[in-house]
Image: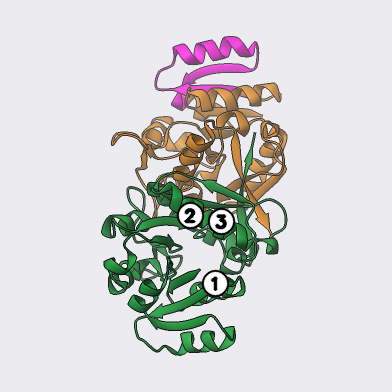
Chain colours: A orange, B green
């Protein structure tokens, strides 16, 4: 499958690398057509990998991943272009972490709204699926790094889009995928970040994940 | 031990009943000295149980539980009286759920503050420990209702107070008790409520709990 990834940071590079290793063709998008981090990533992949602008990546992908940080996601998606996102599954991995007031970061939107919902409202023709934003990057693409049962959440308004994302997540190794319903469930997963960050401090590392034990 | 419980709802009654069954003397406090729900609860316990005002319960307890709903907790605690809370462990089980804007509820405070922190700031001489607020009431006092590993969080500024609460939690049956650090960690646990409520809808019931799987 052709997949466009917006964002050349560790999240975009890691998900992109996993998708290439699974046989997908991946274009990493950034603000500019040539980007040093993206070029290095393309070299590492040997084949099936390319780079371009946000618009190039969105246009290229049958599925598009938003791997930009939540504070700049709407701006990046606008640069990608609504027409390039229309009708497509848009996987939103972002969190609205605001570091401008110091540590720990707060959320720039929460409680009665979320970045996932803002993206869906701004791009009504895209099929936004919120997922993976509650999980350390390395664990996102290799759940076996955390032993035992643990879970990934999906939320979005389009059932077929969630099914397609669920298939991709299974190909990453995820076994328990919890469908939280519509995109407003992004409030719940984004609001996990404060305890996630606290747990990272408590455990002195990010290699953990949430599991919902059920009676 | 003598324990005061503020709040006569299902949380206060359930925790109170468990504490009585463990041999503690428990006074359930409400706005008024006599309260129909509290009277019924006292009758059910046979012994070691009594009722009174918020101030009566706080004065009675060596440890005090805040089991009022978060929106009215500060008011209830002011009625209990700062002098009756001074130097004591104050276990805060509340969540600031605001139902006034319809369903799902939002949080009346979150992100850069929490009801746990507000309580600690308002009653600086109490030793506030936030715990159990992420867990269904029945599971709070009987973790075995949910099979497998699952966890309870504690947060607070006073290490000795957290140890005393940890002992109580162990007597309830809790095995994994995660110390999240100071009382500002209450932001993290209170912000779990949106996904908790969403999961309750997804699973069609409240008998589940969070577990942190670790690599």
Q: Position of residue B68 (x, y in %)?
A: 41, 71
Mark 3: few/some/many CA within 10 Å (<14, 14-19, 20+): few
Question: Considering only vertical position in the picture, is A94 above or below B187?
Answer: above
Q: Position of residue B185 (x, y in %)?
A: 42, 47
**Residue A16 visible in this rendered orientation of the protein:** yes
Question: Considering only vertical position in the picture, is B145 above or below B112?
Answer: below
Position of B141 with respect to A113 (left or right) is: right
CB contact under 8 Å: marks 1 and 2: no
Q: Which mark is residue A4?
A: none
Question: Considering only vertical position in the picture, is B51 above or below B89?
Answer: below
> CA separation, marks 3 and 1?
13 Å
Q: Name the residue under label 1.
A: B24
Q: Mark 2 points at which residue?
A: A184
Of label 3 and label 1, which has the lower sequence position?
Answer: 1
Chain of the residue on which disc 1 is drawn: B
Q: Is mark 3 on a helix, strand or loop?
A: helix
Chain of the residue on which disc 3 is drawn: B
Kindly identify the residue that appears in the image at 35 percent across and 35 percent down: A103
CB contact under 8 Å: marks 3 and 2: no
Q: Mark 3 points at which residue?
A: B167
Chain of the residue on which disc 2 is drawn: A
CB contact under 8 Å: marks 3 and 1: no
Are the residues under badges 1 and 2 in a single subunit?
no
- Viewer-closest of B80 and B95: B80
Q: Based on the displayed image, in which of its 4 quarters is residue B212 positioned?
A: top right
Residue interval drawn in magenta: A26-55
Kindly identify the residue that appears in the image at 49 percent across and 49 percent down: A186
Are the residues under badges 3 and 1 in a single subunit?
yes
Q: Position of residue A154 (x, y in %)?
A: 59, 47
């Amino acid at each position: 499958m052709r997949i466009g990834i917006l964002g050349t940071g560790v999240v975009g590079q890691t998900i992109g690398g996993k998708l290439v290793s699974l046989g997908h063709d991946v274009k990493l998008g950034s603000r500019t057509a040539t980007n040093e981090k993206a070029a290095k990533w393309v070299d590492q992949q040997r084949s099936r990998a390319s780079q371009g602008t946000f618009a190039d990546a969105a246009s290229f992908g049958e599925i598009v991943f938003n791997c930009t940080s939540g504070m700049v996601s709407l701006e990046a998606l606008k640069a990608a272009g609504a027409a390039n996102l229309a009708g497509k599954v848009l996987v939103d991995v972002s969190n609205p972490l605001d570091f401008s007031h110091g540590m720990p970061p707060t959320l720039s939107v929460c409680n009665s709204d979320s970045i996932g919902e803002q993206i869906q409202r701004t791009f009504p023709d895209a099929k936004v699926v919120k997922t993976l934003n509650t999980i350390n990057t390395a664990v996102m693409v290799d759940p076996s790094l955390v032993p035992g049962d643990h879970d990934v959440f999906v939320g979005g308004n389009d059932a077929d889009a969630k099914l397609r994302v669920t298939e991709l997540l299974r190909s990453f190794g995820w076994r328990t995928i919890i469908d939280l319903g519509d995109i407003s469930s992004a409030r719940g997963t984004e609001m996990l970040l404060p305890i996630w960050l606290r747990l990272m401090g408590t455990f002195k590392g990010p290699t953990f994940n949430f599991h919902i034990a059920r009676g």
